[in-house]
Amino acid sequence: MERVDKILRHSLFLSKLEIINYFEQDRKFCKHGIQHLLDVARIGSIILAQYNVDRNVNIHNIADEYMYAAALVHDLGRADEYEFGVPHEEAGAKTAAEILNDCGYSESEIEKIVSAVLFHKDVKCRDCNNYSLASVLYKADKLSRCCFMCQVREECKWEEIDKNNTVII
């Protein structure tokens, strides 16, 4: 996944992560650094494999590379949210488009991935069974959190329905 490696080395990707890490250094709730991004990518890939193999569901040809690309850029907008108050999914979509373009993704690939970034926070994806890249990204993002072990779980602003009370795959 050469283009995914390019994302990981891209200067804008690295600078956004640095800003996020700075603002979240004392954060007691879930963080949005590289570990989270990779967790989302890996869980998303598991979801893709599970539905493609075990259930023979057509997931619209979502490739692992798209899953990794979407997962790596999906929360980069947090940097602009912290600095300027812009919703992270909107800021992230713009940042993602720039990074993906520089890393050799086609316009149609960028459109698919940016759309997933833009809608990854949409609660309509919670129970969605269309297995679009956005819905898989949403599910992987939520499943990456270990709410059942969190020491500040009661203070979390997530609704109970979104908290992970057990390991789910």
Image (tube, rainbow, N blue to C red):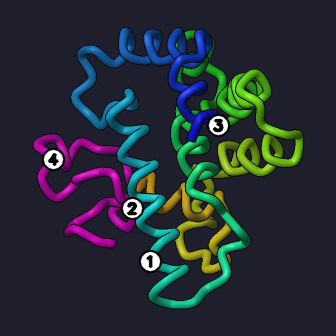
| Residue plotted at (79% across, 27% down) | 101
Q: Disc 1 vs disc 2: Cβ atoms closer than 8 Å?
A: no
Q: Quadrant of residue 105?
A: top right
Q: Is residue 114 magenta?
A: no
Q: Nearer the viewer, mark 3 or mark 2?
A: 3
| Residue plotted at (66% across, 23% down) | 86
Residue linked to disc 1: 50
Q: CA distance from mark 4 to mark 2?
A: 14 Å
Depicted 59 relative to depicted 54: above or below: above
Residue linked to disc 2: 162
- Per the image, label 4 sits on a secondary structure element best described as loop
Q: Which residues are magenta?
A: 143-169
Residue linked to disc 3: 89
Quadrant of the snapshot with the C terminus: bottom left
Secondary structure mainly formed by the magenta segment:
loop
Q: Residues within 10 Å of mark 2 (few under 14, many from 20)?
A: some
Residue 150's disc is 4
x and y percent of residue 122 in the render?
62, 55
Q: Amino acid at mark 3?
A: Glu
